[in-house]
Amino acid sequence: MNVLGFYKHRITVARVHDIPVRIDYRWFVVFFLSVWLIAVNLSHSGMVGPGFKVNPQDTGSSWILGVIATLGLFISVFGHELSHALMGRAEGIEIDEIVLHPFGGLARLRNEPQSPGAEFRIAIAGPAASFLFSLVGFLAMFAATIPRYNTVAAILFLISSGNLLLAIFNLFPGYPLDGGRVLRAILWRRTGDIAEATRLAGICGMLIAAILIIFGVYMAIAPNFRSYFMGLWSVLVGLFLFDAAFSVVRQARGPRQDVVSQAMSAPFAIEPEMTISQLIDTVLPLHRQAAFPVARARRLHGILSLEDLKSLPRDRWRLTQAGDVMRPIAPRFFVEPNATLDYARELMKRNGVGSLAVVGKNGELVGFLQSGKFKRRKRARNAH
Ligand SMILES: [Zn+2]
């Protein structure tokens, strides 16, 4: 099973906080299974919980209650992912999408967190939200038992326990679970080596996945359990996690992701007051570039693309300044030094100028990237 290919089959159902929410079509199978499981249990044996008792229901009500409880559970999963996404955004990372898939959800961030602290906060935001949902749900459930709203209490009980499970399960310390990301952040902070931290957290993830698989098989065949469904589910989740953890471990062992700072060239910028004729007479013969960052005192003002000058009549070259014809600064024209090269390539393909200014943390111009002209610099590796 290929994790990347796995996420391809999905449909966009909503945009929340400008984040596309997509659903993997196999998710609908799981949704139906969950409705069915709850409905069958409610119609056969009803439900008994803390402070409430629901007698076996007729088929119609069982299915309606199954749908309501399942919707509540999946909205909770979405809330968990949204919490990761909003924390990511607060850390300055763009969010590509939230995907709901058969085994839960995923908030896909465009870049890796830039520091262990950021990684920790983004990872912990999901389980924190789930704990909160579960707490609020249990309180509402106890409130509902007072006037004996038994079915309401039963639904709230299912949703709250689901959230509690989601929070606890996600805190298992193995990548790609949230607890694994927390572990990675801690190792990363201790050693300063993100690749090694990722590898170790991935190995823990593989161990947890293996335990889930073994436990699932045991549940299915042990005489005192014989819970085929839960066993099979545990095996499937285990296989899914194992695959994701394994690919992370393999990647961390292989060549590291190249980042922008390794490929950028030193920034050569022109001032906004430079006229186009000056640019063509004095700068172009020395710097054969298709675009130039426009900056004053290392502060980026925009990007001037030679392509844009084609429409400017020759007799205007003397009077026109770079600042008049440059493209003003916009997110698609710059990256941070530790963004990945893959991301930078993608941005250059789409931004219409084929180049990017590299801007440091305080907004200062630190480098320049042009598609097809990457400076190859040998990466420093730890010898020990
Ligand atoms: Zn999570």
Image (cartoon, grey):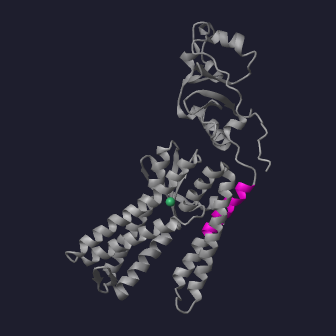
Expressed as whole percent of the image width and height from the top left, the position of residue 329 reads 53, 27
Q: Is residue 245 magenta?
A: yes
Residue 353 occupies quadrant: top right
Look at 49% across and 71% down and name the residue there: 30
Q: Is residue 13 visible?
A: no
> In this view, which residue lies farthest toward the bottom?
223
Look at 64% across and 73% down and name the residue there: 210
> In this view, which residue lies farthest toward the front?
190
Along the line of sight, the residue nearer the viewer: 256 or 187: 187
Q: Is residue 178 left or right of residue 129?
A: right
Number of marks in picture: 0
Along the line of sight, the residue nearer the viewer: 168 or 100: 168
Look at 55% across and 81% down and name the residue there: 231
Expressed as whole percent of the image width and height from the top left, the position of residue 355 reads 65, 31
Expressed as whole percent of the image width and height from the top left, the position of residue 162 reads 42, 70
178 lies above or below 323: below
> In this view, which residue lies farthest toward the left?
147
Look at 67% across and 44% down and name the residue there: 342
Q: Is residue 46 magenta?
A: no
Q: Main secondary structure of the magenta part?
A: helix
Task: Tell me the quadrant of the picture where the N terminus can be found.
Answer: bottom right
Q: Is residue 138 visible?
A: yes
Expressed as whole percent of the image width and height from the top left, the position of residue 201 reads 63, 60
Along the line of sight, the residue nearer the viewer: 16 or 29: 16
Residue 13 occupies quadrant: bottom left
Q: Which segment did they paint magenta? A: 239-253
